[in-house]
Image (tube, helix red, strand yellow):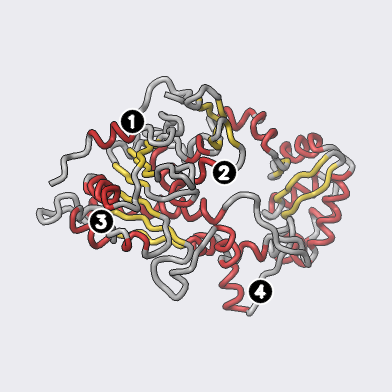
């Protein structure tokens, strides 16, 4: 076991069997989330060919150790790897037999691909009525854009996030990670759990396992779902929210501020918090200003407030600012990079940095598991598998074809 836990506690999803057909990020992220809490996730990967190395392309993304991405140890921990060629009828037939015994199947192919392979949900659910299928795609399984290719970068743009992620007047930038994929994976995992609850409630003599269903998640919709007041403000007032850099428009003060040796972010937008913040930076005049006692007044004078805060932080180092504002119970923090995260004691105290040892002996630190469940916590039981590592064992346990 590759975990700091010496014994495995009861797990919330123990006994749940999942077949993961997706690749790269969104579908596999949903699978990882389930696997962290005990689901038996069997990842189906393509074999190597003369033209391709085989396996999920994520194995070859970003920084590699002995030919395999260290990212793999995050995305595929707790999973089993089975190599099957879905381009052949033999491979597809074996996958169908695996799905017959599964609770959940995850796929994130272009809509129509599963149907082309003879694995439409209607056909699979006739063989396994309790089956839940998570389908993640760029634009969803219906609608005029359903057949378009979709990646997270496009979903973030269409969902409204990319437009806002810029300094005013500058080209929008990406966050540096595939947020659209991760948000879709999380929505997909939530959808599976909802469908499992509904299946449990539908158990009857006619449906002893209950009835399954399709969970349809579009990348752009997962992004759009997190866009807060973007649409209602346009609908009600015709207001098109604009990029604002590090500030949070309409909520003040909330921004990044320069220090003598770096930057901090400060959230002083609660009424009582604002007053404590102004007293802490020796601006009692602003703390007692009646117009600034509530958010609307602060929004009108946000430039003045930001200047006051920035003048105070600029004359102090980051640690001084953190000490003063933490003592005043004002939300404040440094802007972390990877080294800051790795060295932070709070991350480690919360088991958010855990070691995994790869098959060839490299110890890699990976993000821990969330959410934290008190009675049935998640556990890292297995490192990311080598390609096809579990093919023989999984197929040997499969019931003979009828």
Residue visible at 22% across and 48% down in the picture: 100
Q: Which mark is residue 61?
A: 2
Quarter of the figure with the N terminus: top left
- Name the residue that disc number 4 marks: 240
Q: Earlier in the sequence, mark 4 or mark 1?
A: 1
Identify the residue under disc 3: 212
Disc 2 on helix, strand or loop?
A: loop
**Which quadrant of the view contains residue 112?**
bottom left
**Mark 3 and mark 2: span between their CA atoms?**
34 Å
Q: CA distance from mark 4 to mark 3?
A: 41 Å
- Other-residue count near label 3 (Cα within 10 Å), few / some / many at <14 / 14–19 / ≥20: many
**Left or right position of 237 against 169:** left
* Element type at mark 3: loop
Q: Residue at x 79, y 34 (%)?
A: 319
Whichever of callouts 2 and 1 sits on the residue coming sooner in the sequence is: 1
For mark 1, what is the residue?
10
Label 1 or label 3, whichever lies nearer to me, is: 3
Q: Mark 4 vs mark 2: give the one in front.
A: 2
Mark 1 vs mark 3: which is more N-terminal?
A: 1
Of the two numbered discs 4 and 2 on the same chain, state the one appearing first in sequence: 2
Q: Measured from the top left, where is residue 224 in percent x and y?
A: 53, 64
The answer to which quarter of the image holds residue 300 is: bottom right
Query: Does residue 382 sit above or below 108 in this rendering?
Result: above
Q: Residue at x 69, y 51 (%)?
A: 272
The answer for how far apart the CA atoms under marks 2 and 1 are is 34 Å
Q: Nearer the viewer, mark 2 or mark 1?
A: 2
Q: Mark 4, residues whose alpha carbon is within 10 Å: few (<14), some, or many (≥20)?
A: few
């Amino acid at each position: 076991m590759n975990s700091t836990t010496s014994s495995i506690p009861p797990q919330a999803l123990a006994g749940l069997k999942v077949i993961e057909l997706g690749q790269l990020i969104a579908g596999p992220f949903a699978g990882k989330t389930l696997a962290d809490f005990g689901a038996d996730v069997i990842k189906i990967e393509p074999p190597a060919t003369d033209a391709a190395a085989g396996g999920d392309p994520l194995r070859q993304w970003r920084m590699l150790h002995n030919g395999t991405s260290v990212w793999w140890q995050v995305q595929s921990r707790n999973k089993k790897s089975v190599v099957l060629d879905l381009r052949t009828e033999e491979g597809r037939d074996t996958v169908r037999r695996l799905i017959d015994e599964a609770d959940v199947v995850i796929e994130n192919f272009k809509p129509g691909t599963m149907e082309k392979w003879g694995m439409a949900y209607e056909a699979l659910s006739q063989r396994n009525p309790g089956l839940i299928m998570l389908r993640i795609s760029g634009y969803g399984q219906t609608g005029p854009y359903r057949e378009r290719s979709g990646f997270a970068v496009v979903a973030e743009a269409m969902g409204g996030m990319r437009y806002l992620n810029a300094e005013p007047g500058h080209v929008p930038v990406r966050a540096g990670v595939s947020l659209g994929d991760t948000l879709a994976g999380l929505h997909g995992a939530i959808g599976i759990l909802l469908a499992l609850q509904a299946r449990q409630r539908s158990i009857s003599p006619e449906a002893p396992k209950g009835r399954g269903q399709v969970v349809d998640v579009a990348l752009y919709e997962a992004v759009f779902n997190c866009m807060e007041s973007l649409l209602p403000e346009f609908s009600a007032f015709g207001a098109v929210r604009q990029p604002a850099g590090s500030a949070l428009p309409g909520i003040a003060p909330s921004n990044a501020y320069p220090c003598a040796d770096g930057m901090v972010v400060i959230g002083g937008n609660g009424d009582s918090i604002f007053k404590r913040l102004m007293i802490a930076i020796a601006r009692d005049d602003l703390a007692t200003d009646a117009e600034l006692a509530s958010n609307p007044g602060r929004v009108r004078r946000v430039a003045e407030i930001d200047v006051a805060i920035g003048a105070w932080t600029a004359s102090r180092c980051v640690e001084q600012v953190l000490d003063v504002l933490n003592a005043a119970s004002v939300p404040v923090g440094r802007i972390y990079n990877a080294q800051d995260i790795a060295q932070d004691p709070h991350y480690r105290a919360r088991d958010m940095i855990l070691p995994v040892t790869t098959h060839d002996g490299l110890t890699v630190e990976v993000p821990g598991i969330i959410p934290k469940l008190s009675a049935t916590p998640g556990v890292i039981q297995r490192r990311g598998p080598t390609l096809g590592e579990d093919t023989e064992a999984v197929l040997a346990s499969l019931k003979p074809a009828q």
